[in-house]
Image: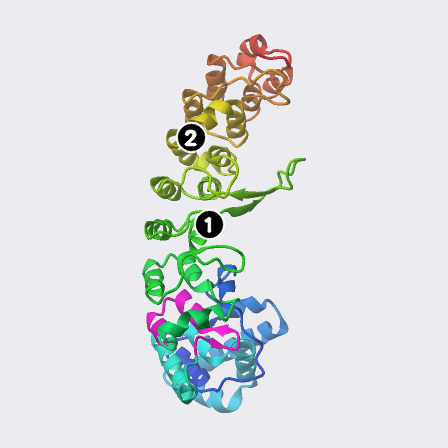
Amino acid sequence: MEWDDLPADIQSLILKQIASLSETTWHREGEPGGLFLVEDDESELVLRRGESDERRRERDAYRDIQNCLLVSSKSYIYHFKLWLTYISERWSNLMGNLLAVYGPVEVVIAKGSETHATAAVKCWLAKGATNGPLGWYIGRQDLLALSIQRVFVGCMKLLLDQIPPHERRKYWNGHPRHEACYPHIAAANGQTAILQMLQRYEMDIDQPDWQGRTPLAVAVRQNKTQIADYLISVGANKDFTLIKRTDMVSCYDNGVYELCPIEWAAHHGTLPMVKILAKHGLVGPQPSQNRPAKPLFWALTRPDLADVSDIAGFILDHGDQSEIENHGPMHLLNALKHSAPFDLVQHLILRGAAVNPPKQWPGMVPLDAAIQWASEETIRLLVDHGARCTLDAVNAAMERNLGNLLDVLLSRCDTPDMT
């Protein structure tokens, strides 16, 4: 049994009990708001603690609640109140486990409805009204970040209004671990309206977080096409790169690549994201990059190329033609190695990809790759366009029982000095 399994009225009782507590000085410091962007499960804060003794005791407490509810279906509220007040030691464990990491207000925002959360924030602000604006934090607990994540507009307004406009920038910049996370969380969750609201409160949509990511970079990385379209439309900085780490380590690099937006979208994104970037002219390298963009290369090296070949097809039709003209054999080879369908291979050839590499080409050639991994239809397509192969490929054809192609393949078999 977990939190979401509890009846709504029981949740309300627990949240009311938690909200009535004072902030303690012994709870561990909360998570910086920006870390909401990197958590595997952002919907259940308790799960961040892992399978510890505290987590097991917490599950026991939930089971106690369940057992209490089974005592009487008609009077379980009464029994629960008695149990909550006088009986269960495990209730203390549950409260302690939650509040050791998260303060009462944050727990209510994380677990409750917007009504619960707004009431808790109002109560917290009222307690500190005599001491001036409380801002957005309890220690390092970021109430605003959590409110944005849960799309609690009422809580957001209450918190944002604590800081006067002329002091907001100073207050924001005084917390370097938090200062840039708010637009990023809205971007990561695809919340255009929340992003617009933050802009009205003078949040900078171009300020990078501590990892150097802007909200637009987050939107591209997480395939939030509407957010990307909006941010570019309102003038967000488009000159950024995203780090790609691969196993393709060579003598020229260590497997770490800085990809421009169109390259990232081509390799990790969706066709709608690629189209949005193309619509705004982001089909080439960024001004800060001293190299040409290679979106077709990254599209053709996707592990799931067979399922998203339309991305490569779009780039072929709208990208830089010189990329296919200068590196045609390499693109064909990458496509065939990654299970490109027949239509995409045909598209590459029709757009000008040469089926044979230049002389002294090291290693496998496109027809070799087709013989190993592609369909017979694709092999014949390459043969019909004059592709040549190596003797190793002929042996591979025999292993695949492609005996009906052996004669034509032998006629295409050449020495390494191919033309």
Residue pictured at 60% horizontal, 15% vertical: 359
Can you give x and y, in whole percent of width and height, for residue 292 in the image? Answer: 49, 34
Up the image or down, 240 lies above or below 97; here it is above
In the rendered image, the residue lying farthest to the right is 251
Q: In what quadrant of the picture does the C terminus appear?
A: top right
Callout 1, which amino acid? Arg
Q: Which residue was labeled with disc 1?
A: 221
Question: Is 235 drawn above or below residue 12 in the view shown?
Answer: above
Question: Which residue is at the far bottom?
Answer: 86
Say how the picture is coloured.
rainbow
The picture places residue 67, in percent across and down from the top left corner, at 49, 79
Relative height, residue 310 to residue 229 (above, below)? above
Q: For residue 141: magenta?
A: yes
The kind of secondary structure element at disc 2 is loop
Q: Residues within 10 Å of mark 1 (few under 14, many from 20)?
A: some
Q: Is residue 83 magenta?
A: no
Can see residue 160? no
- Seen in the picture, residue 413 relative to 84 is either above or below; the reply is above
- Count of picture labels: 2
Amino acid type for the residue under numbered disc 2:
Asp
Tell us which disc is closer to us: 1 or 2.
2
Task: Find disc 2 in the rendering and name its residue.
Answer: 320
Residue 363 in sight:
yes
The magenta-colored residue range is 135-158
Tell me the distance, in whole angstroms, between the alpha carbons under discs 1 and 2: 23 Å
The residue lying at 36 percent from left, 77 percent from top is: 118
Front-most of 333 and 316? Answer: 316
Report whether 57 appears left or right of 384. right
